[in-house]
Image (spheres, rainbow, N blue to C red):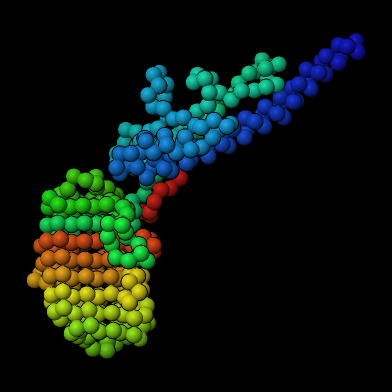
Amino acid sequence: MTLLYTMLAFIVLIGFVSLAVDFGRAQCAKTELQRAADAAARYAASGIDDGTWADKAVAAARDNLVDGIPLILDNSLPGTPKDIEIGNWNASATPRFSTARAPANAVRVTARRVASRNAAIPLVFGRIIGRSTCDLVATAIVQKSANIPNFVGLKSLTAKNNSSAGYDPHLGTPGSSNLTSGASIASNGTVGFGNNGNINGSVLLGPSGTYTGTSPKPVTLSSTLAFPATESAPFAASGSLSVNGTLHVSSGGTLVYTSINISNNSTLIFDNPTTVYVINDILFSQNGEIKPASGLPADLRIRVVGSATSIVGGPNANNIEITAQIYAPNTDFAVHNNGDVRGTALFRSMFAANQLSLWYDISNASVVYGSYTDTGSGVTYVQ
């Protein structure tokens, strides 16, 4: 009887050991599996716009270990559900995630360590009670939100030629060694750059917007791009500012001008961080420039608060360069040849007969000033 009771107790003891050791191992692996699925889905969502979502999910999964082994995602296994799926996430719809619904704005990753793939988590003591492996499955859904744009022409943004990219102003001016992708331009109307558009980033369109290019694939937003009206000038203008040659403004702080006029071959430099309110126009002739002395767009904020007739630049002006964070929703930016805007800008429209260059400041993660009402930026873990 003692031997019998001992044998029964030993079986119970083995069960408890299995619970402590194997269950603990399985729970640790489950946590790692969920973490790997989350990472894969987040990275995959960043590739929705350019079609790299599946490759990015696979790459991120392999960077994560589950029970000491890299996670493998595979959509090609016959007779098994897909590990990586692209579809639409809508919290108000049923189901909330659907691969059959448009537009595609989310990725679902299902990470599996299961026996049917010869990848189940092995159990050591569980074999004694007839359980040699444990199947684990983890799911993550991540939604790609439309980026808050760096440059906006609310009604249109057009030029014969264009280049758009990011740069780090701490490293100097944009150039071959100081460029990065990710610039986001947006409009409720037409975005068009002829045959020579080079957008290193994304194009966001309102529901009725159009894009004349083929790359990148534009993202159509669920609602119209809408930004707050420009705030009024905080105090009366000190008059118009005329620039002939190189003019340094050293006062800093907040300044208000009726208008700013840049003569031929002239440069306006703000020596200290400044917010400039302009009630009417900013007009350029030829070869004009406005910039902060630091070269950092965040050090110069320009708010054009005039009526819808205000114009920045001019249809006959060439070689216009502005380094600033510009907010002018009632203003048309127009330049004939070589318009160069560094930082971020919101205009009613942007036009260049030839060559419009838009460079956003990656060091400041510069986006258009004000609140964009459609959605946030980056990716969002939704389930």
- Residue 205 lies, in percent from the top left, at 24, 52
Q: Is 200 drawn above or below residue 383 in the view shown?
A: below
Q: Quadrant of residue 362?
A: bottom left
Is residue 280 in view? no
Q: In this view, does 183 lie to the left or right of 20?
A: left
Is residue 215 in view? yes
Q: How many marks?
A: 0
- The residue depicted at 79 percent of the width and 22 percent of the height is 13
Residue in the foreground of this view, choosing between 197 and 325: 197
Image quarter hosting the N terminus: top right
- The residue depicted at 28 percent of the width and 51 percent of the height is 201
Q: Is 148 drawn above or below residue 303 in the view shown?
A: above
- Residue 142 lies, in percent from the top left, at 42, 42
Q: In this view, does 121 lie to the left or right of 306?
A: right
Q: In this view, does 179 lie to the left or right of 336?
A: right
Q: Quadrant of residue 123?
A: top right
- Residue 291 lies, in percent from the top left, at 28, 74
Q: Is 95 drawn above or below residue 185 in the view shown?
A: above
- The residue depicted at 24 percent of the width and 61 percent of the height is 358
Residue in the foreground of this view, choosing between 309 and 341: 341
